[in-house]
Image (spheres, rainbow, N blue to C red):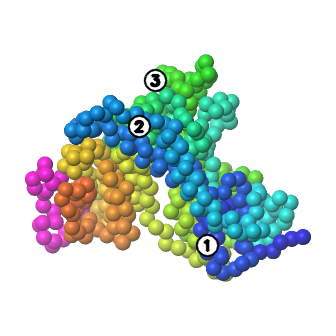
Amino acid sequence: MVRKVDVAIIGAGSAGLSALSEVQKKTDAYIIINAGHYGTSCARVACMPTKALIEAANCCHGREMFADLGVEGVDRLRINRKKILARVKAMRDGFVKGTKQATDELGDRNIAGRARFRDPRTIEVNGEVITARRVIIATGSSPVYPQPWRAFGDRILTTEDLFYQDDLPDSMGVIGLGPAGLELAQALSRIGIRVTAFDQIKFIGGLSDPQVNDSAVQAISGELTLHLGTRAELSDVGGKVKITHGSGETVVDKVLLAMGRRPNVTDLGLENLGVELDEHGMPPFNPDSLQIADLPVFITGDANNYRPLLHEAIDEGHIAGYNAFRDDVSCFRRRVPLAITFCQPNVVLVGKRYAELDRKTTVTGSFDFGRQSRARMSNTNQGRLSLYADKGSGTLLGAEMAAPGGEHLGHLISLALQQQVSVFEMLTLPYYHPVIEEGFRTAVRTAAKQVDKKLNESELLLCESFPPECIS
């Protein structure tokens, strides 16, 4: 017997649950199918447990500046990694419990199993055939794990495995220094693990601005050993793992793989949709509507690998859920791109990245936080901000930074970009003293001076900070 529904959602992660909330507004004839764990990757093995670990790690690291602040007795403090991990797992379980509630009460409209397309409107799961007017793919992603390295067994951890550990060893290698690898490498180092980290490229955390990247590398390398621009090879040595790299060899107890994630589309039957797939097995889709070609099928969240971030996945779930009930599919204006890596200093990308800019039509305003007064007070005076604006009009285009409080600066800049604000308009806003945001103002001022457009604003907008050692 064939089950007929209005909408079938494949995947119960953040994008799938977001789509579900839209679908439930319009119909009861829906189904959600999920292979593997429930509870969303964000709550279970990504955003939330990572940030819980980072908070503990930052507290541990705070002891490094106690003496400088006049606090004595730091030698009596101990790091208990087992207790840190136990707290992280307890918080993780709470987050997962909350997200699972959305599917636990759905009865037979929630199917645990692996779905496969027969055609754009027909799915098979656990031997059952389901036809749907619309299908939403929200299958998420999984960590990249080279097959030959699986032979190392539990000496290799993925970024998901990490949050199921009861304890961690004294030495670890981290392979991959994108956002996840960078966050975790620093956090592990801050809880007393000797970390050596590797990446084949010389840029970390998704940065593409050379000056910002140099500043980020300098800051991070003060806490752990980095080997950038070199390929890492693994081999067994006495029950440990030897990592061979361009400048030598390193032996560690375990290795954390943070080499990125791949969309979970293998064996989904996308070849039966009747559209040409690319070299990665992905179908063509419109990022503003999430529709695959002209089919009644939408692909969302990490599954499409367009912007694999939680807030984007939630947006995409709503877009797909909304479009699932419209004969004329709508395109949505997407939010300004915003990506934050919660290492210290925070690595933040907003709007257009340096690598995406036309250098002939762009001006850059920069600020080095090394001497900034507020950052010096908290011993966080590391990092650099680069702000990009259109040379003709002064309209903000984007920013890259490794900055103290970068998560907040990033939101300030994203709000300005979303409203298409110019550097001149940003200079009319209030900036308190002393705050980290004063560094952003200096970068805005520097960019404004390079813009071709001549304005009649007060000279106050472009004047130098005074005195620079207090205000900058």
3D distance between C-alphas at marks 3 and 2: 25 Å
Q: Position of residue 411 (x, y in %)?
A: 37, 62
Q: Which residue is mark 1?
A: 21
Q: Are marks 1 and 3 in contact (CB under 8 Å)?
A: no
- Tell me: residue 289, above or below residue 35: below
The answer to whether residue 272 is left or right of residue 280 is: right
Give how far apart the Cα atoms at labels 1 and 3 are: 52 Å
Task: Tell me the residue that label 3 is attached to.
Answer: 247
Instruction: Compare residues 375 and 73 and report the one nearer the observer.
Output: 73
Q: Which residues are magenta?
A: 450-472
Residue 243, horizontal then vertical, whole percent: 54, 26
Within 10 Å of the Cα at label 1, are there few (<14), some (14-19), or many (20+) other Cα atoms?
A: some
Which type of secondary structure does the marked residue at label 1 adopt? Answer: helix
For the residue pair 138 and 80, the one nearer the viewer reads as 80
Q: Is residue 467 magenta?
A: yes
The type of residue carrying mark 1 is Ser
Instruction: Say which label, 3 or 2, has the lower sequence index.
Output: 2
**Residue at 62% across / 69% down in the picture?**
19
Amino acid type for the residue under numbered disc 3? Ser
- Observer-side mark, 3 or 2, equals 2
* Mark 1 vs 3, N-terminal side: 1
Residue 25 is situated, as x and y percent measured from the top left of the image, at: 63, 79
Camera-side residue: 169 or 204?
169
Question: Dot 3 lies on which element?
Answer: loop
Does any portion of residue 128 appear in the rendered image?
A: yes
Quarter placement of the N terminus: bottom right
Establish if 200 lies above or below 373.
Answer: above
Is residue 63 part of the magenta span, yes or no?
Answer: no
Q: Which residue is mark 2?
A: 190
Q: Between tags 2 and 1, which lies in front?
A: 2
Judge whether residue 221 can be spotted in this image.
no
Q: Amino acid at mark 2?
A: Arg
